[in-house]
Image (spheres, rainbow, N blue to C red):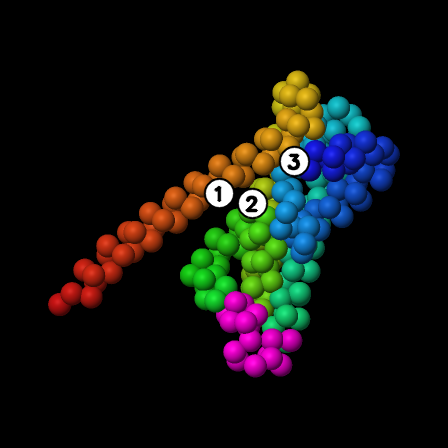
Amino acid sequence: MTALTQAIGGLHGSVIYPAFALLTVLLFLLPVGVVVPGEPFFVLAGVMAASGRISLPLILVALLPSAVLGPYLGYRAGRGLDARLQRTGPKSTLRKLVAKGERALQAHRVLASTCCCWVPPLRTTVPMLIGAARQPLRSYLALSAAGTSVWIALFVLGGYFARSFFEAAATGVGIVLVGVLVPVAMGRMARRRLQRTRATRQVRQPSSEGP
């Protein structure tokens, strides 16, 4: 991760913008999106903008449409996967896994569409599952765009306004650590909230079934 961050940080000129845009698209696709967190790269983009190497408005213009294109391609991949699964037997292992994922997604579709960008495995699987379930594309892209815009802007602007901190933290290593630890902490918070919601529903369910 540090090597990749340093490689992108070593780019110069106008090639920086398409490089960041391409990476942002790949973050939503297999296999890159499963193992590569995007936050360190967005922080790096903010740091580079603060140092004057790139323009802050231009890097945001490059990143935000890419964060819509990535989920769109994942959705289309899910539609293609569903078409192939329809030709397989009902006992297909992959078909069972996809069906299980669709059922798990059903109750939390809005939350997953908006917030899946924070968790690398979900960032790639949720668009595919929504596509495989043939959910409306327009509503999904609207929710996804809202979530990814906040996700990208938060880390780019964080890097922009905290440039001195990241440079003091050995640049590459500091960016990676912050970019990884922040989403991990937020993921834990989201998981705890989900657990509390499920516990509340379990408590209310018996009372609603009473006489």
Disc 1 to disc 3, how far (Cα)?
16 Å
Dividing the picture into quadrants, the one containing residue 6 is top right
* Amino acid at dot 3: Pro
> In terms of depth relative to the viewer, which is nearer, 53 or 84?
84
Q: Residue at x 79, y 43 (%)?
A: 19
* Amino acid at dot 1: Gly
161 in relation to 102, above or below: above
The crowding category of the residue bearing disc 1, from other C-alpha atoms within 10 Å (few below 14, some 14 to 19, many at least 20), is: some
* Amino acid at dot 2: Trp
Q: For mark 1, what is the residue? A: 187
The crowding category of the residue bearing disc 2, from other C-alpha atoms within 10 Å (few below 14, some 14 to 19, many at least 20), is: many
Dividing the picture into quadrants, the one containing residue 21 is top right
Compared across the picture, whether 92 is left or right of 80 comes to left
At which x and y percent is residue 91? 52, 78
Instruction: Give the SS element for disc 2.
Output: helix
Q: For mark 3, what is the residue? A: 40
Pick whichever of labels 2 and 3 is earlier in the sequence.
3
Q: Are marks 2 and 1 in contact (CB under 8 Å)?
A: yes
Disc 2 to disc 3, how far (Cα)?
12 Å
Magenta region? 84-99
115 in relation to 55, above or below: below
Report the quarter where the N terminus lies: top right
Instruction: Give the SS element for disc 1.
Output: helix
Compared across the picture, whether 185 is left or right of 29 comes to left
At which x and y percent is residue 32? 68, 50
Q: For mark 2, what is the residue? A: 118
Dividing the picture into quadrants, the one containing residue 60 is top right
